[in-house]
Amino acid sequence: MGGQIRAVPGAALGWDMTAALAMASAMGISPRAVVELLPVIEAVMVRRVNEQIAANRD
């Protein structure tokens, strides 16, 4: 999902959920599973990406 991140200069805001759902569908993953799990995963990933951005600024 690296190329599907919503961002502004200096911070990641979230993933492109339309792209994520399309990718999951193409992979045969249940849409129900995606809508249940992806928001939780997205929150952690956005936090981690922003931590890395902040660390690289210092």
Image (cartoon, rainbow, N blue to C red):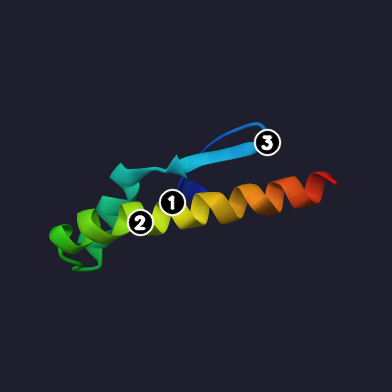
- Distance from Cα at disc 1 to Cα at disc 2: 5 Å
34 over 19 or under it: above or below: below
Disc 2 or 3, which lies upstream in sequence?
3
29 over 22 or under it: above or below: below
Pick whichever, 31 or 27, lies toward us: 31
Question: Which amino acid does the dot numbered 2 rest on?
Answer: Val
Report if residue 2 is visible in the image.
Answer: no
**Of labels 2 and 3, the one closer to you:** 2
- Distance from Cα at disc 2 to Cα at disc 3: 22 Å
- The residue most toward the bottom is 28
Mark number displayed over residue 40: 2
Question: Which amino acid does the dot numbered 3 rest on?
Answer: Gly
- Mark 2 residue element: helix
Q: Are marks 1 and 2 in contact (CB under 8 Å)?
A: yes
Residue at the spot 73% in from the left edge and 46% down from the top edge = 54
Q: Which image quadrant is residue 33 in?
A: bottom left
Q: Residues within 10 Å of mark 1 (few under 14, many from 20)?
A: few
Q: Is residue 47 left or right of residue 32?
A: right
Mark number displayed over residue 10: 3
46 over 11 or under it: above or below: below
Q: Which image quadrant is residue 24 in?
A: bottom left
Report if residue 44 is visible in the image.
Answer: yes
Pick whichever, 15 or 39, lies toward us: 39
- Mark 3 residue element: loop
Disc 1 or 3, which lies upstream in sequence?
3
Question: Which amino acid does the dot numbered 1 rest on?
Answer: Ala
Residue of label 1: 43
Q: Is residue 31 left or right of residue 56?
A: left
Q: Position of residue 7 (x, y in %)?
A: 55, 36
Q: Residues within 10 Å of mark 3 (few under 14, many from 20)?
A: few
